Image (cartoon, grey):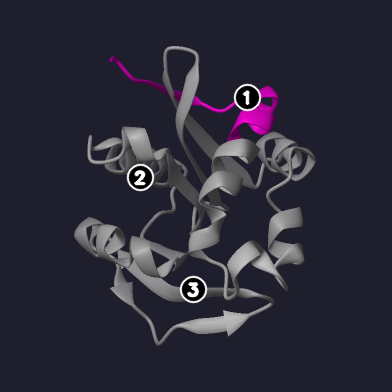
Amino acid sequence: METLIRVADPDDAPAASRLIRSLSHHFFLLPGGQGAERFMASTSAAELYALMASPHFHYLTAWQGEVLAGVAGMRDHTHLFHLFVAPEAQRQGLARRLWVGLVKAAQAAGKGQHITVNASAVAVPVYERFGFQREGTEIRTDGIRYVPMRWVA
């Protein structure tokens, strides 16, 4: 199926929230997400609507027909805030296409030389293939765990 990648519209927020929340368990310290309420609140449709409407964020969405297959967002062209691809759309190069689109937008804005991400443990190999390097060990806080990483152009 053909995939359309486009700049996100704030009206995409409910679908983006559903996709992100369906994959958020990879960040949880405990099954069911106990303790990760702050993280989960940040992935609500209302929060994502505000982020997508903010001049400090740039979001892309990937659609396969009427289905949201992926979403990616960057804050201030320096921090990869979200990059999620539906399981059925993984291993098709979609994450890389979203990543490259965000890097191009950052560089067009005169930034994008150094980009950070807080990666879930399962996503670390993907980010390493994109050229990110670990910046330390896994961090555990507020019910979630992640690995800080940095990409240099």
120 lies above or below 43? below
Secondary element type, mark 3: strand
Which residue is rendered at x = 63% and y = 24% of the image?
A: 9
Q: Nearer the viewer, mark 3 or mark 1?
A: 3
Give me the disc on residue 99.
2
Q: Amino acid at mark 2?
A: Trp
Front residue of 74/153: it is: 74
30 lies above or below 96? below
Cα distance in 3D space between marks 2 and 3:
19 Å
Q: Nearer the viewer, mark 2 or mark 3?
A: 3
Cα distance in 3D space between marks 2 and 1:
18 Å
Q: Amino acid at mark 1?
A: Asp
Which residue is rendered at x = 40% and y = 54% of the image?
A: 112
Q: Amino acid at mark 3?
A: Tyr
Marks 2 and 1, the one that precedes in the sequence: 1
Secondary element type, mark 2: helix
Position of 45 compared to 81: left or right? right
Cα distance in 3D space between marks 3 and 1:
28 Å
Q: Which residue is outermost to the bottom?
A: 137
Which image quarter: residue 89? top left
Q: Which residue is mark 1?
A: 9
Give residue 62's position: percent from left, percent from top.
43, 27
Q: Which residue is mark 3?
A: 146
Is residue 56 inside the magenta stretch? no
